[in-house]
Image: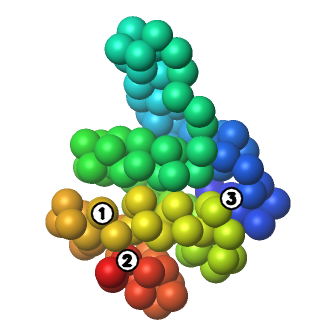
Amino acid sequence: MSTTPVTEQRDASAALRQLCILCPAFERWWGDEETEDRLVDGVHSELTHHRLAMEFLDFFAKNHGTLTRQQLRALGGWVNEAVSIDDELGAAVASCFLRHYREQHLGRVLSPYLSAHARAKSRP
């Protein structure tokens, strides 16, 4: 599975589309979460890099066992590229996904596919 380099998609909606391509079940999950947000808040929360990273962490924590090795490898590549640039997407992936996925004991799932730089970002 080939991925589009993250450097070409530094806005949150493009990152959302890429994650939905990498993990098609995330698109359905995201839609369900959006519906739930509408019912609770009456309005959609703004899509930001940090919100996307937190929502993807929730999805990943609950669904990582359904991802194929190929999907995990592609996701690892995406994460590696995301954190390679010091901008909002890189900061969100580092702080809202990588650091917290270790706290949820998911490090063994994705770590084999992460660069040393990305693994270092997962530590506080």
> Residue tagged by mark 1?
101
Instruction: Report the amino acid beneath label 1.
Output: Tyr
Q: CA distance from mark 1 to mark 2?
A: 8 Å
Q: Residue at x 41, y 49 (%)?
A: 54
Q: Is residue 70 left or right of residue 19?
A: left
Task: Give the Cα separation between the discs numbered 2 and 3.
Answer: 22 Å
Question: Tag 3: residue type?
Answer: Thr
Name the image quarter holding residue 72.
bottom left
Give the image location of residue 62, x and y in percent: 25, 43
What is the secondary structure assignment of the residue under circle 1? helix
Q: Mark 3 falls on what kind of element?
A: loop
The image's colour scheme reads rainbow
> How far across and down, in percent of the image, does residue 10 sit?
74, 57
The image shows residue 40 at horizontal and vertical percentages of 35, 14
Q: State whether residue 12 is above or below residue 86.
A: above
Q: Quadrant of the N terminus?
A: bottom right
Establish if 93 lies above or below 47: below
**Residue at point 41%, 87% (across, down):** 120
Q: Which residue is mark 3?
A: 3
Residue mark closest to the camera, 2 vs 3? 2
Label 2–label 3 contact, CB within 8 A: no
Which numbered disc flags the more N-terminal residue, 1 or 2?
Answer: 1
Circle 2: residue type? Ser
Q: Do residues under tags 1 and 2 come within 8 Å of each other at their CB atoms?
A: yes
> Badge 1: how crowded within 10 Å, few (<14), some, or many (20+)?
many
Is the residue 110 above or below the residue 16 in the image? below
Q: Quadrant of residue 5?
A: bottom right
73 shown above or below 66: below
State the image coordinates of residue 102 (x, y, percent, origin top left).
Answer: 26, 69
Q: Is residue 78 left or right of residue 87?
A: left
Q: Is residue 109 at least partly visible in the picture?
A: no
Residue marked by disc 2: 122
